[in-house]
Amino acid sequence: MSNFVLPGDKIAITEEYEAGNNACDDGNVVRATVIGENQIDKKERLVHVKNHKSLSVPEVGDVVIGTVEAVMGSMMAILIKYINGKAVKSQVECICPTRNIRKRNIALVKDLVKLKITGHLNGAIHATIQDPSLGVLFTKCRKCGMDVKPLRDIVKCVECGWTDDRKLSSDFLKTDFLKVGE
Ligand SMILES: [Zn+2]
């Protein structure tokens, strides 16, 4: 997980650290006052929040592209690389519920996926994959790790011929998104 924090997030306890830049303490807990990256200065015993310029947090309706970090039973976690086609350096993750999607392998870890942000809940950014344009942009064969080609709504490995399903984006294997915003 990243050290990304939202305003009001607990970033330390006052017994250990004092509030530094973009932080405040309520007597017990040090909290962030801005969106940013939490940075601990052990020497000065201060905790700062760096309000990074390139740190962008996607808003509801934004289209994001990122790499799948983890696939769980009913959701996956994605590290966001692009917001509305613009590259972002911040290590912001979002969560995408997948329980309503009838695919065995919606996406694999390391796949590049396109999602739409649906909201912020309990400090987590939530996204959806349920639109024809949303889904996997790049993936590899689950058996041998080689490239795959789309075959209607499934994918087939160019090397070993293994066929598999994914929730493919209509932009699957297109690279245009990389030119946008660069
Ligand atoms: Zn293969």
Image (cartoon, rainbow, N blue to C red):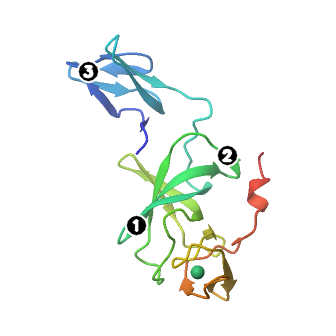
Q: Residues within 10 Å of mark 2 (few under 14, many from 20)?
A: some
Amino acid type, mark 2: Ala
Distance from the alpha carbon under mark 2 to that under mark 3: 36 Å
Q: Which residue is mark 1?
A: 75
> In the picture, which quadrant includes the C terminus?
top right
Amino acid type, mark 1: Met
| Left or right for 181, reference 165 | right
Q: Does 120 appear above or below 38? A: below
**Residue 45, image x, y percentages:** 31, 14
SS for dot 3: loop
Q: Residues within 10 Å of mark 1 (few under 14, many from 20)?
A: some
Disc 1 C-beta below 8 A from ligand 1 = no
Q: Are marks 2 and 3 in contact (CB under 8 Å)?
A: no
Comparing 29 with 160, the one in front is 160
**Residue 143, image x, y percentages:** 51, 79
Of the numbered discs in the image, which one, if any, rests on residue 14? none
Of marks 2 and 3, which one's residue comes earlier in the chain?
3
Of marks 1 and 3, which one's residue comes earlier in the chain?
3
Q: Which residue is mark 3?
A: 26
Q: Does 127 appear above or below 98? A: above
| Left or right for 16, reference 36 | left
Q: Residue furthest top?
A: 44
Q: Does 82 appear above or below 137? A: above
Of the numbered discs in the image, which one, if any, rests on residue 87? 2
Distance from the alpha carbon under mark 2 to that under mark 1: 24 Å
Comparing 17 with 69, the one in front is 69
Give the image quadrant in which the ligand numbered 1 is located. bottom right
In this rendering, the label closer to the viewer, 2 or 3: 2
